[in-house]
């Protein structure tokens, strides 16, 4: 996992956990910053004698490594946009290095939810994009902005072209009138691009977040966990 979001929530959840004594256990983002072992260090303060592998951290989960994000990334937003205008795809170069390690079956990038300029750098480096959305009134605005951003990258990117792997509907309360209204409209608008699975609102997700563990670890048989399992199967079928 490459955490490109400056909030670093994904990194926190994969690195640390609240133990049974209520104390934090595992690594912290601050420790990785001190050790110059984050995405920021790998991209913006790179030691030319260090391999990209030196910046990647093992997590507490089997077969899952992390290139951690931290709040320093927010200081580089304008630089990423400027580099993009010069066709300098900094994240793509970094991802190519990770691919060259031949260690990973999949590289997943977690990005900020906005279709912002720095996310263009992310789109320039990936093969597929998964768009999360909720059952809100203005759902099409955000989705269409992502599509427009991807189109702009495909105009300048050498093959292969980026494609939208699918749209996942998240945090759904099917009992509400807005969900009952928006869901059919969303499927009508975007057709088979919308994943069949929907992720329901589930209290176990909030509980897992408080303990900084994935919901699939915290409550593997819960509604949300089962939905994420089905979503994962759909993703694998589409790749």
Image (tube, rainbow, N blue to C red):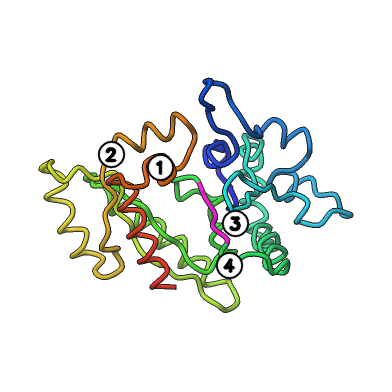
Q: Secondary structure at mark 4?
A: loop
Q: Residue at x 54, y 54 (%)?
A: 109
Magenta stretch: dominant secondary structure? loop
Quadrant of residue 31 within the rendered picture: top right
Is 82 left or right of 226, judged from the image as shown?
right
> Between tags 3 and 2, which lies in front?
3
Q: For residue 121: magenta?
A: no
At mark 2, the secondary structure is loop
Whichever of labels 4 and 1 marks the residue nearer the N terminus, that label is 4
Q: CA distance from mark 4 to mark 1?
A: 22 Å
Q: Which residue lies under the disc numbered 1?
A: 215
Q: Residue at x 34, y 48 (%)?
A: 225
Reply above or below: 120 against 157.
above
Q: Nearer the viewer, mark 3 or mark 4?
A: 3
Which residues lie in the magenta part? 107-111
Q: CA distance from mark 3 to mark 1?
A: 17 Å
Gap between marks 2 and 4, in whole Å? Answer: 30 Å
Toward the viewer: 149 or 53? 53
Q: Residues within 10 Å of mark 3 (few under 14, many from 20)?
A: few
* Residue that mark 3 sits on: 63
Q: Residue tagged by mark 4? A: 105
Task: Say which of 143 and 202 sits in front.
Answer: 202
Q: Is disc 1 in contact with disc 2, using a CB cutoff of under 8 Å?
A: yes
Say which label, 3 or 4, has the lower sequence index. Answer: 3
The x and y percentages for residue 54 are 78, 51
Looking at marks 3 and 2 on the same chain, the residue that comes earlier in the sequence is marked by: 3
Say which mark, if any, is on residue 202.
Answer: 2
């Amino acid at each position: 996992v490459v955490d490109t979001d400056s909030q670093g929530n994904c990194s926190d959840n994969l690195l640390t956990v609240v133990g049974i004594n209520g104390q934090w256990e595992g690594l912290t983002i601050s420790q990785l910053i001190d050790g110059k072992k984050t995405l920021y260090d790998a991209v913006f303060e790179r030691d030319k004698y260090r391999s990209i592998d030196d910046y990647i951290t093992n997590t507490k989960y089997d077969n899952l490594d992390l290139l951690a994000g931290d709040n320093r990334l927010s200081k580089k937003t304008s630089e990423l946009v400027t580099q993009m205008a010069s066709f300098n795809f900094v994240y793509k170069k970094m991802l190519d290095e990770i691919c060259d390690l031949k260690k990973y079956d999949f590289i997943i990038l977690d990005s900020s939810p906005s279709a912002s300029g720095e996310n263009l750098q992310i789109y320039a480096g990936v093969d597929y994009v998964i768009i999360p959305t909720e059952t809100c009134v203005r759902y099409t605005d955000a989705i269409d902005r992502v599509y427009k951003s991807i189109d702009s990258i495909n105009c300048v990117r050498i093959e292969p072209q980026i494609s939208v792997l699918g749209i996942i509907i998240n945090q759904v309360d099917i009992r509400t009138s807005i969900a009952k209204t928006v869901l059919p409209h969303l499927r009508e608008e975007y057709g088979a691009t919308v994943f069949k699975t929907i992720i329901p609102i589930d209290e176990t997700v909030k509980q897992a977040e408080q303990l900084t563990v994935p919901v699939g670890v915290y409550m593997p048989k819960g509604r949300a966990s089962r939905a994420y399992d089905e979503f994962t199967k759909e993703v694998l079928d589409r790749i």
